[in-house]
Image (tube, rainbow, N blue to C red):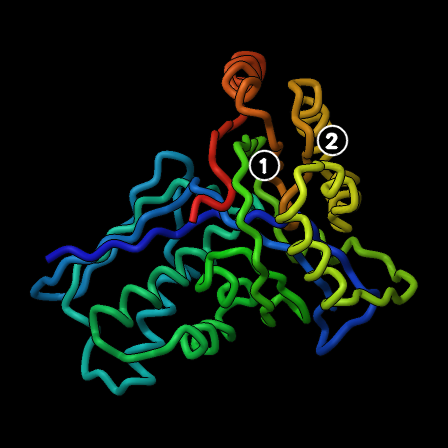
Amino acid sequence: MELTEIAKSKINLSLNLSGKKNKGFHDLISFICFGSFSDKLKLKPSKSFSYKINSSIQDIVLKDDLVLKVIHKIKKIYNLEELPKIDLVLEKNIPLGSGLGGGSADAAAAIRLMNNFLELGMSQDQMCSFGMDLGTDIPACIISKPLIAYGAGEKIAKVDFIKKYQMLIIYPNIEISTKEVFNLVKPIKNKNLNLNKIKKSIELYNLDNNNSFFKGLSNDLQGYAIQNYPVLKNVINVLNLNKSFFSRMTGSGSACFGFFEDKFIDYAMENIDKSYPHWVVEKTILNDL
């Protein structure tokens, strides 16, 4: 018997700061969807516990691996005498330090997988609570469907957003620390980020085919990240020059994304791949639920 969980890439279509802080964390609100570009976590019963990562992108250090933290937390909370007798293999595609939430998505996949394999009986809300102290993005990645994250990112409001988009994700081979980018944020005037108003505007867009909706979406961290990593501005410009109708940095970077009409995306990918061979360019579908 082999069990598999998909860890989808997290795409912040918007990320806005309120100007307030709570327990050292910036108060924010972010409209998040998920892409088909993903990692995969596979489990097989075994005679002992083993865990390995297969990655063609980066050398992965196990020291702070969130999948292992999930396994050890389950052992502690559920009073297991030993680690589960399983072989775990993580097929790693999402780059670290890209703002695509790969580590959180992997942890969320591990929680879902172990909940199933060990028959722990956790509901989705309980899995979100279980993962929250391991990372503020983990609850969103447990759900992996369109949502608004707020507070420090750990609070969730699901949204009805059914539209799908063809997109390119570009990782310019730069690893950026989330902490580094947030440390660049300067004090800003407090903004009233109205959750219900944002949720309503997103759900109303389901009834509309006007892509001008995206012009109102912004990432407050993008300008700060570009200060230290000017290449990000170039990435976004390249997406726009190749006929992306909506492009942004996701999360705290370094990955950026662009939405494309079907007739333009293959040419854009080929052109960017050829012009920037040191960048990682991935074609993916947003909201491929």
Furthest toward the bottom, the residue is 79
Query: 194 or 224: nearer the eye?
Result: 194
Residue at coordinates 42% horizontally, 39% vertically from top-left? 58
> Which mark is in front, 2 or 1?
2
Q: How dense is the environment of label 1, judged by Cα within 10 Å: few (below 14), some, or many (20 and up)?
A: some
Residue 253 visible within the image: yes
Q: Would you call the spot at circle 2 few (<14 residues within 10 Å), some (14-19), or many (20 or more)? A: some
Instruction: Identify the amino acid type marked 2.
Output: Lys
Quadrant where the image shows the N terminus: bottom left
Residue 49 percent across, percent down from the top left: 18, 65
| Label 2: element kind | helix
Q: Which residue is mark 2?
A: 233
The residue lying at 76 percent from left, 37 percent from top is: 212
Give the side of residue 244 with respect to residue 2, left or right.
Answer: right
Which residue does the image show at 51% across and 41% down from the upper left?
Answer: 286
Looking at the image, residue 267 lies above or below residue 140: above
x, y percentage for residue 263? 54, 18
User: Where, by quadrant of the figure, is residue 98 drawn?
Assistant: top right
Taking the image as shown, residue 45 lies to the left or right of residue 70, namely: left
In the image, farthest residue toward the front? 207
Q: Earlier in the sequence, mark 2 or mark 1?
A: 1
Determine whether the residue tagged by mark 1 lies in a helix, strand or loop: loop
Residue 42 position, x and y percent, is: 24, 53
Name the residue beneath numbered marker 1. 174
